[in-house]
Image: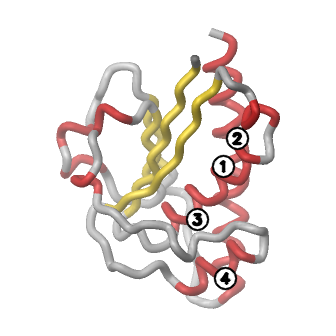
C-alpha cells in the first residue's frame, strides 16, 4: 500500500493552505489513483495560528472551480502529529521552525511555496493566487504519484 499524507501550512490557515488542500484533494479525486486500492491519499491544512475564519474570497474563488473549502476545519500545527505526514508544504513565508518536531524528519518531503503570493485584496488577486496554487498542486501531485508508485 502506498500512503501519501500531505499537510499544507501557512500562517493563519485562512487562505493559501486551505486553497492548496482543497485543490490537491480535487486533483486526487479526479485522478485514476482515487480508485486504486493500493494508494491511500490524504490532505489537510493547518496554520501556525488560526483566525477561526477562512477568507471569504478564498472560498469564492475555489467555488468557481468546483472546490468547496467553506467548511474545511481550521487547525493549528500543534494540533497535528508530525509523524502522520510524509509531505509538508509551507504555502507562504511562514516556517515550521517554531515547531522543532516538524523539522528534518526522515523520509519526509518538504517544500516551501513562499513564491505563491497574492498581490492585492480583490477578487482578481485571489483568482491569480488560486491559479498559482493550482499549477503547483498539479506539479506536486504528478511528482508524488511518480515518486511513490515507481519505487
Disc 2 designates what residue? Answer: 139
**Do residues under tags 2 and 1 come within 8 Å of each other at their CB atoms?**
yes
* Residue 36 screen position, x and y as percent: 73, 27
For marks 3 and 2, give the CA distance: 15 Å
Nearer mark to the viewer, of 2 and 4: 4
Q: Which label's residue is closer to the chain start, 4 or 1?
A: 4
Nearer mark to the viewer, of 3 and 1: 3
Q: Quadrant of residue 146?
A: top right
Disc 3 designates what residue? Answer: 19
| Residue closest to the far top | 151
Nearer mark to the viewer, of 3 and 2: 3
**Where is 60 relative to 81, above or below?**
below
For marks 2 and 1, give the CA distance: 5 Å
Disc 4 designates what residue? Answer: 60
**Where is 65 relative to 37, above or below?**
below
Q: Secondary structure at mark 1?
A: helix
Q: Which residue is painted at 40% across and 55% down in the image?
A: 9
* Residue 19 screen position, x and y as percent: 58, 65
Residue 136 - label: 1
**Where is 94 relative to 141, above or below?**
below
Disc 2 crowd rating (10 Å Cα; few below 14, some 14-19, many 20+) is few
Q: Which label's residue is closer to the chain start, 3 or 1?
A: 3
Amino acid at each position: 500500500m502506498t500512503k501519501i499524507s500531505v499537510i499544507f501550512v501557512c500562517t493563519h490557515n485562512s487562505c493559501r493552505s486551505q486553497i492548496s488542500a482543497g485543490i490537491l484533494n480535487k486533483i486526487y479525486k479526479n485522478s485514476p489513483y482515487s480508485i486504486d486500492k493500493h494508494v491511500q491519499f490524504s490532505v489537510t491544512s493547518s496554520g501556525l495560528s488560526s483566525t477561526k475564519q477562512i477568507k471569504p474570497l478564498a472560498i469564492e474563488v475555489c467555488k468557481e472551480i468546483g472546490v468547496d473549502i467553506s467548511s474545511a476545519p481550521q487547525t493549528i500545527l500543534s494540533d497535528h502529529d508530525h509523524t502522520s505526514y510524509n509531505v509538508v508544504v509551507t504555502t507562504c513565508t511562514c516556517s515550521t521552525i517554531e515547531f522543532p518536531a516538524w523539522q528534518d524528519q526522515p523520509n519526509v518531503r518538504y517544500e516551501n511555496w513562499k513564491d505563491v503570493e497574492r498581490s492585492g485584496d480583490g477578487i482578481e488577486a485571489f483568482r491569480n493566487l488560486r491559479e498559482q496554487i493550482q499549477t503547483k498542486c498539479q506539479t506536486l501531485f504528478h511528482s508524488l504519484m511518480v515518486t511513490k508508485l515507481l519505487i
